[in-house]
Image (cartoon, rainbow, N blue to C red):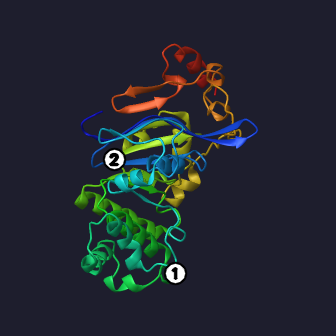
Amino acid sequence: MNPQSILEIRDLKKHFEVGKGKTLKAVDGIQLTIRENEIVGLVGESGCGKSTLGRTLVGLYDKTSGEVIYRGQKMPTRFTANDFKKFSREIQMIFQDPYSSLNPRMTIREIIAEGPMIHGIWSRDQIDEKVGFWLKRVGLHPDHMSRYPHEFSGGQRQRIGIARALALEPKLVVCDEPISALDVSVQAQVVNLLGELKATLGLTLLFIAHDLSMVRFVSDRMAVMYLGQMVELGASDEVYFRPRHPYTQSLVASNPEADPRKERERNRKPLQGEIPSPINLKPGCRFAGRCPKAGSACQSVDPVWREIEPGHFAACHLFDPALKGELAAVSGNA
């Protein structure tokens, strides 16, 4: 394991049996290393497996195969109650939906204090002081601790979810689309808050989102998923401004311009074809049916995950020396 890394994911798979001999490959062979005190953004279309990957990392889903190594320690395939208690001190999750992720029958005081009390790191005499401290850290007032979740807006609830996750002072936080259910102005507030907390608390974040421009703004590196597999990984600016995989190029091209005039003048070329079913997938590149640069090999041979430039990885036959000539001819005719 790299001494600078906090989390290493090796060929991680999460498959769901859906009956009649069919298997849904939600996460299928992910390789990723997350370094200490960095933010890795994870992007992709809905249904590509981003949230499933996040939930598998924190033990909410059992692993089908592969390894997740946290600080040199291999995490179990199936979490027991003791495993949850052990790893939840170090790894926490901020959930996508601020409405359903908080228990409506508990006060904010009880919600934030629950984890530290289970782990015995707060005494009862400290609860009000500690909860008040974390509410202030996320921009809420300590007087709010006696209220219930329904008394808050969506943005305030997400801040409460952040306070709950950080009250245990974890080292790694998986943020599962924490801004997708919020208004744009509130999204910016939450992203700025996460950036501030990362800087002051030394957090490491896996930031899952749809919005490429937001992920580029908040993250150090950007990873792109398609149908359960990683297709590109690199420095955020590099992936955003110089995307190498055809799927990443299409995602960036679909991202709206901030300038309305430029947005109107853009010549968009929408992807053709349907997203294939993730059930019982056949060999070959999963993007081949929609890719304007696909060749015959793409239909039957799985692309290899390789480093195409220092620190920049992709899984695409375009970077296979043995197929470069064939695919260059196809690209020229596209």
Label tally: 2
Q: Quadrant of the N terminus?
A: top left
The relative height of residue 108 versus residue 89 in the rendered view (above or below) is: below
Tell us which disc is closer to us: 1 or 2. Answer: 1
Mark 1 residue element: helix
Which amino acid type is shown beneath numbered disc 1?
His
Q: Which residue is mark 1?
A: 150
Asked if marks 1 and 2 touch (Cβ < 8 Å), the reply is: no
Q: Position of residue 75 (x, y in %)?
A: 39, 42
Sequence order check, earlier mark of 1 and 2: 1
Residue placed farthest to the right in the image? 20
The relative height of residue 322 versus residue 116 in the rendered view (above or below) is: above
Closer-to-camera residue (20/165)? 20
Residue for point 37% across, 82% down: 145
**Quarter-of-image position of residue 31:** top left
Q: Quadrant of the C terminus?
A: top right
Closer-to-camera residue (149/237)? 149
Q: Position of residue 191 (x, y in %)?
A: 38, 62
Is the residue marked by circle 1 packed among few (<14), some (14-19), or many (20+) residues within 10 Å?
A: some
**Distance (Cα) linking label 1 and label 2:** 35 Å
The circle drawn on residue 220 is 2
Q: Position of residue 247 (x, y in %)?
A: 56, 38
Closer-to-camera residue (112/208)? 112
Q: Position of residue 184 (x, y in %)?
A: 48, 67
Mark 2 residue element: loop
Which amino acid type is shown beneath numbered disc 2?
Asp
The circle drawn on residue 98 is none
